[in-house]
Amino acid sequence: MITISNIWRSAPSNTVLILQARYKSKTHWAKLKKKNSPKYKALNHFDEFYGSVFGNKWVSMKEALLRRSKYVAVVNNYGDAEQTMEYLSNRGAHCLKNLMSIQKEFHNQYNPQTETPPTENTKQNNLDNYIAKLQSEEISSIYPQGEDVPDNIEYSDKQFLRNSIQKDAKEKQVRSTSLNQAIEEAQIDHSRIIEPSMGLTSEALYQYVPATKLKGLDEWVPESLHYSFMTNNVDFPLAIEPETTFSYPEHLKVMSYEMNSDYDRFPEPKRCNTGVFNYYPMDCGSVLSVLALCLSPGDRVLDLCSAPGGKALVALQTLLPDVLVCNDVSISRCNRMDRIFRDYLMDFETGNKWHERVLITRRDGRDFTDDHGFDKVLVDVPCTTDRHSVMEDENNIFRADRLKERLRIPELQSQLLLNALRVVKVGGAVVYSTCSLSPAQNDGVVHSALKMAFQSNGIIATIRDISAPFRALSSTLNLGSGVVKPKYGQLIVPDIAANFGPAYVSRLVRIK
Ligand code: SAM
């Protein structure tokens, strides 16, 4: 009979070791796999970056991010709205509009003296230290010990490393002996040589960099560049004014549970008698981006990165826009948006026909043009989607093969915001929003887009501080304060008691 003890007895003396080694290696692989998972990498990255910038406050934010998030119910005006409101309030939910007005009365309007003063210097110092640490790590990784670091390596006030590499090449500065040796020995890639006969300007010829010099470095985008958008230099007109014209849209019905409420889950949405769903579940931060648009009757609105259409749906539920253009570069996401609209919208018999007012377009938002101009533009950009990144491996921006894409996010975001500032009418408003805590993707992008808009198009926009009306929601959500409070917008911070966000919302009004 074959028994374990028989195997032991007949086995050579090193069997135990082999079995142990195999067992150990299994554990090791499992650990290694976990450590290489995108969500693990995301959490590590956030621990380092947000831990450096937000200090102790990051601990509770992280705890909330890793827990189940909350959502609100946007009641569908195209369904049995009154019935749905009653159904949800019987389950303990409150109407956001009532909560806002009660809270506003309670505090007898916004009082700036009660605000925690933002500690900008501390925050900037934390950021500067973090960037300096990253830069020194990056430099030592490309110039390992023993190699001379060229003096001309500098990061400050440069938007993209590629520019600095090209500039260096243009000035024919010698980087390192080993690199130049490699260039001497390398084969020339003739497909990348620019012939004068191609009709290019001397400027373009100047920009030419030998393929061999860029090879390798072309792929390399330093992490610290991600943060170069957070510069403090203000060399363009920049004004921050309190928003005084905010009013809650009369027809928008949003139901929410208050902070620390025992019961905070909504039942599944159901089909109404009209065939559409009774409510749309979403993060409260997303509702705030639409509120920040301060929509007015008859507005011509553009939602530049619209799919799958959650915020567009909220804008339509206000019944205010005359025209809503929903644009997104992704065909599959646009198709999803179309399906969502069909599930939630229907034509009223009395003339309110959504098909005539809602237009879905599939263009790159950086090149979107329009002859008439828009009264309001929402720019809800692609970002590091912090909550998703620490919770899900699928479609995670921290996947190794998406590194390049991730490091170029602030660049894409500022180009999208820049174009929004171009297509909005003078006097109109742009709302920029992300679902990230990253100061680089939030204030950093607003700063850089305002600068580019002024320098390239002479556009001036003021930042409208909308924190006063938003503070009327303090019984429902947590707005960043102190070191977490952004300069140019409002941040909905994940909190165990009010687990919404993260969501950053900045309201800009074009004045020139
Ligand atoms: N606003 C949407 C909502 O509320 O449902 C969510 C938008 S999501 C955060 C960002 C969107 O930007 C994605 O759907 C993505 O396809 C889109 N996007 C990415 N790059 C874009 C570009 N260059 N132009 C337009 N849209 C872009």
Image (cartoon, rainbow, N blue to C red):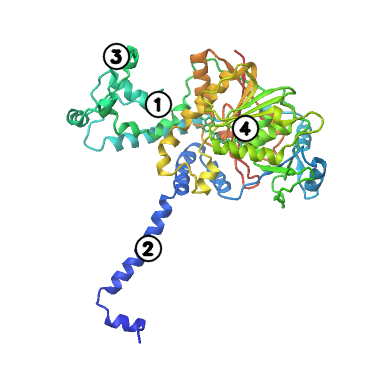
In the image, residue 164 sits, relative to residue 33, either above or below, namely above
Q: Is mark 4 within 8 Å of ligand 1?
A: no
Mark 3 highlights which residue? 197
Q: First in sequence: mark 1 or mark 2?
A: 2
| Labels 4, 1: front one | 1
| Labels 3, 1: front one | 3
- Residue 116: which disc? 4
In the image, residue 427 sits, relative to residue 393, either above or below, namely above
The N terminus - image quarter: bottom left
Give how far across and how far down residue 119 sits, in percent.
55, 30
Position of residue 13 in the picture relative to residue 105 (left or right): left
Which residue occupies the foreground of this view, 49 or 418? 418
Q: Report the amino acid beneath label 2.
A: Lys
Separation of marks 3 and 2 at Cα, in angstroms: 62 Å
Mark 1 highlights which residue? 160
Q: First in sequence: mark 3 or mark 1?
A: 1
Q: First in sequence: mark 3 or mark 4?
A: 4
